[in-house]
Amino acid sequence: MVMTIINKILTILMQLMWKVVRPEDLQLGDHVYRYGLYGLYSHHGIYIGDGYVIHFTPTQRRKNTFPSIFKSSYKPSPCSTCGYQKSIDCGVVKTCINCFRQDGKKLRSLHRYEYGWPLLRSKFARRGTCTTLLDTKWPHQVVDEANELHVDNAFGDYNLINNNCEHFATYCRTDNRASEQAAFFSGCKRILKEAKGWIMKKLL
């Protein structure tokens, strides 16, 4: 009894601090994500029930994806649960939770994306974890949207800055294509470009 109470308290604290969610606690239409590349980015998807997630992965016409030095040589065989094969399946895919959590040979923790955060508070949050957008859809509407996009593979070409997995998940939840982590990286890129221009001007 005491251990059960302690476990519940620890679970609540973990969820409050890190937004970690156990697979069995996922709710229909949840926007979930997991970290990759040592926490430098997050991969997003929509939980559609029965242990499955629909998420957007790089398409065959790969543009603006991570440089080849970041790409893993690990090539898994088709999943025995859902049949997903990363080296073949692309675009809007439907996979089991473990395939979604897979990062190389590791299974990452699941996190729940937060909606409706105050602007000031979201400024200090880790990018790709929350948004000021409001989720006004019912869970079944979110799932229907994700399923339709999956069936037709209809979310366009993957683009790290303009059309990525976070854009996909927020679109399913809000009908708005938004990505906080893409906006952050785009801002960093712009600052670096301006800094480079300033340095070159000083050198000339």
Image (tube, helix red, strand yellow):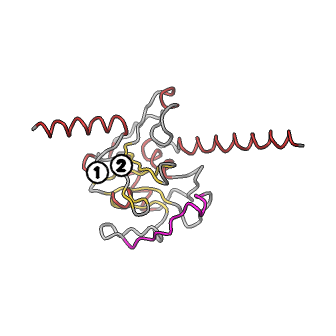
Quarter assignment of residue 113: top left
- Report x, y in % for residue 111: 37, 45
Q: Residue furthest left?
A: 1
Quarter assignment of residue 193: top right
Give the magenta-colored segment's residue range.
Answer: 65-78
Mark 2 vs 1: CB contact within 8 A: yes
Q: Is residue 91 above or below residue 162?
A: below
Q: Quadrant of the N terminus?
A: top left
Question: Which residue has dot 1 on it?
Answer: 23
The Cα atoms of the two marked residues, 2 and 1, are separated by: 7 Å
Sequence-first tag of 2 and 1: 1
Q: Is residue 13 above or below residue 147?
A: above
Residue at x-position 28% and y-position 47% = 22
| Main secondary structure along the magenta-highlighted residues | loop
82 lies left or right of 43: left
- Report x, y in % for residue 90: 48, 65
Q: Amino acid at mark 2?
A: Leu
- Report x, y in % for residue 93: 42, 61
Question: Which residue has dot 2 on it?
Answer: 110
Question: Is 51 or 76 nearer to us in this picture?
Answer: 76
- Crowd tier of the residue under label 2, counting other residues whose Cα lies within 10 Å: few below 14, some 14–19, many 20 or above: many
> Tag 2, which secondary structure?
loop
> Tag 1, which secondary structure?
helix
- Report x, y in % for residue 20: 34, 43
Q: Amino acid at mark 1?
A: Pro
30 lies left or right of 156: left
- Crowd tier of the residue under label 1, counting other residues whose Cα lies within 10 Å: few below 14, some 14–19, many 20 or above: some
Say whether residue 66 is magenta.
Answer: yes
Say whether residue 48 is magenta.
Answer: no
Q: Quadrant of the C terminus?
A: top right
Question: Is 147 or 20 nearer to us in this picture?
Answer: 20
Residue at x-position 58% and y-position 55% = 159
